[in-house]
Amino acid sequence: MKRSIQSAVALAVVVCVAGLAAAQTIDDIQYYNPTTGAPASPYNATTQTVEGRIYVLKGTYNAGSHYILDDSGNGIAFFNSSAPPLTYGDRVSVTGTVGVFQGEIQLSPAPTVTFLGAEAVPTPVVMTIAQAKSDYENVGKFVSLSGLIATAVASNQFKLHAGTDTIIVYIDSDTGINTGGVAVGDSYRIIAPLVNYTGGVMELKPRRQADLIEGSGPIIDAVNCADWTPLASDPITVTTTITDDVAVTSAALYYRDDSGDSTGVFLNIPMSDQGGNVWSATIPGGFLGRQVDFYVRALDGNGNISLNPGDAPAGWYEVAVGITSIHDVQYVDPATTPQNSPFTGRVVNVQGIVTAGTGDAGAVSKFIMQDGSGTFSGLLCYEGTAANFLLPGDEVQVGGYIEEYFGLTEMNPHNGSAIELISFENALPAYNQAHTVVLADDTSPGGYLGEAYESVLVRTFAATVIDSLGSAQYSEFMVSDTGADADSLVVNAAFDMVYSAGPGPVRHREGLHGLRLRRVPAGPPARRGHHGRRHGRRGRPAPDPARGRVLEHQAEPVQPQDGDPLRPDAGQPGPAERLQHPRRAGLHARQRAAPGRRRARRVLGRHRQRGPADGQRHLLRPSAHRRRRDAGPQAHAGEVAGLRLLRGRTEAPAPRPGLSLAVSIIVD
């Protein structure tokens, strides 16, 4: 349970690029120190326009990273989570500011992307490992390298070698690539962008399962379920893409009903060719266990066999059966240390009402949900590809794994399609009113009382500002509803608060939406591990108690009091515009009627009623730490983590000792 709490609102932010765009080639821009590999572009911090074909899509590594390849075979990354939907081979013009992220030159933040037409999918250039690493000017190119596996997979990476030459292959967790079959001595061909990691380390970064080609067997890619949150009676349809240099003669789906002990015999059913290299099979319903395990086997005309996962049947995919309450996921006895979920590492399905939508919880890849109004009823969901657009009041089902991140319990969905919109315009759960001393409690000898409110909507009692010394540097101040330091709570107010100062009843004037604040030690940005687990040298940095604690909260819209009107801010997207967001349309396209369950039909364009404070939202940047984790190249090392106000208004002085206020929050 974190002691600090933050009152804020977040929406997806598009940063406009100023200045005129000069005409430079990608090769001109992509310049590194030939000895150290340090970025040394002569056009750094200038606005440039480049043109090329897409070969890495957003959602592959994170919410906004793309790569393009020009007609000379030179490539460069750009980051824009708001870019229009694109596909491999689309020709685009990109105008943005030349910068650096994690040692690699890129265009950001949020460059302008113009679609020019659909063309042939780019093909990789065949190189040896020695040729690829001979020149840092190759960074950004789409390459194909062959060799033998030199090291076992560890910390989401392994080494490929040919003779005396070696290169690192890094597997980003959001790609969903399974490396279970990668073993030392295996012969592989790797297709990937050639990237430059901090310190001049050149690496391959595959995009999908089909980019790892072992020998000459079939390539089994894009394994997915039509329903990642089935009930016991529901059948489960599994699809996959299978390709081969000869012909795929057959494929089979192996599955078992698992009670949780990972034992039992796998049964198998044939998969049928649906055309376009897509194969499908349906596991019959009537499950007795808590989950279903499965894997795919394919055979080609030469008798070569491939498996996905590659280490099957020792490895497999998992789908939870039925819905688990968030209370069961979150509940921990207050006297227990540590306060980790008993479901950590397990596959589960949860259902609830979104209380902080995508973009409102710190990044477009995060949202918070509750399945009730009591304690232990809230859960933060993190889906790195940001494939969904959700708003408060949406009802969703989510299938995935429970993880702990710096003491914060998270749901990590299987992928973007494992988040299913069930209904919308639902009422939000009622507030839990709690004293500041309880919300801040994570060290009490009597137990960790504040843990019960993690990711839960709460409302404080009227509180007094007792210390504002941190407000200048960190926009933090301390409040207490008793006036005593011992009962205080840290609030991060990195926005223009609107409240009434002075004695008597406190008046709420605006609906506030909050984010997480994190102050982290200096060091290289974190990179995510496999299946949502972060570890190794690229994992998350260890928390440093001396540098501050994690905090999160949410404030909900409230009715005006004492005759004071709530005035909407100009320029905010209205309900219809937000509903028409492409990610939301994608959710609509996935609506279906599964046997035994009722589905709500979505009508795009329908206005959403979001409460009286719908227009009172401030635009803020997510914390630097979360941008590194979620947004990829838009964050830069050395930024002060926190929030920055982009638009708002001030109707009250800065917090100072003696002021009284009350806030509604989501507690972390």
Image (cartoon, rainbow, N blue to C red):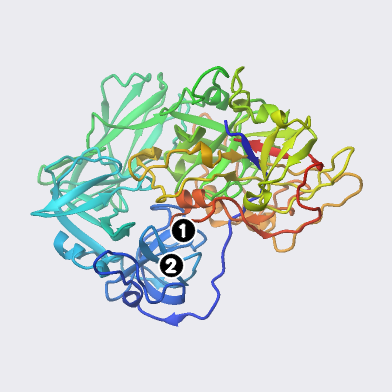
Indicate the position of residue 139 as horizontal and vertical percent values.
29, 65
Which sits in the foreground, 145 or 663?
663
Kind of element beneath mark 2? strand
- Quarter of the image for residue 141 reads bottom left
- N-term mark: 1 or 2: 2
The tally of labels here is 2
The residue under label 2 is 99
Asked whether residue 373 appears in the rendered view, the answer is: no
The N terminus appears in which quarter of the rendering? top right
Above or below for 609 versus 634: above
Q: Secondary structure at mark 1?
A: loop
Q: Is residue 342 above or below residue 497?
A: above
Q: Residues within 10 Å of mark 1 (few under 14, many from 20)?
A: some
Circle 1 sits on which residue? 636
Residue 179's spot in the image, x, y percent? 26, 41
Measured in 3D between alpha carbons, the distance from the residue under mark 1 to the one under mark 2, in whole angstroms, is: 9 Å
Residue found at the very far left of the displayed protein: 163
Q: Quadrant of the C terminus?
A: top right
Inspect the image, locate mark 1, and give the three-letter code of the amino acid beneath it.
Answer: His
Dots 1 and 2: beta carbons under 8 Å? yes
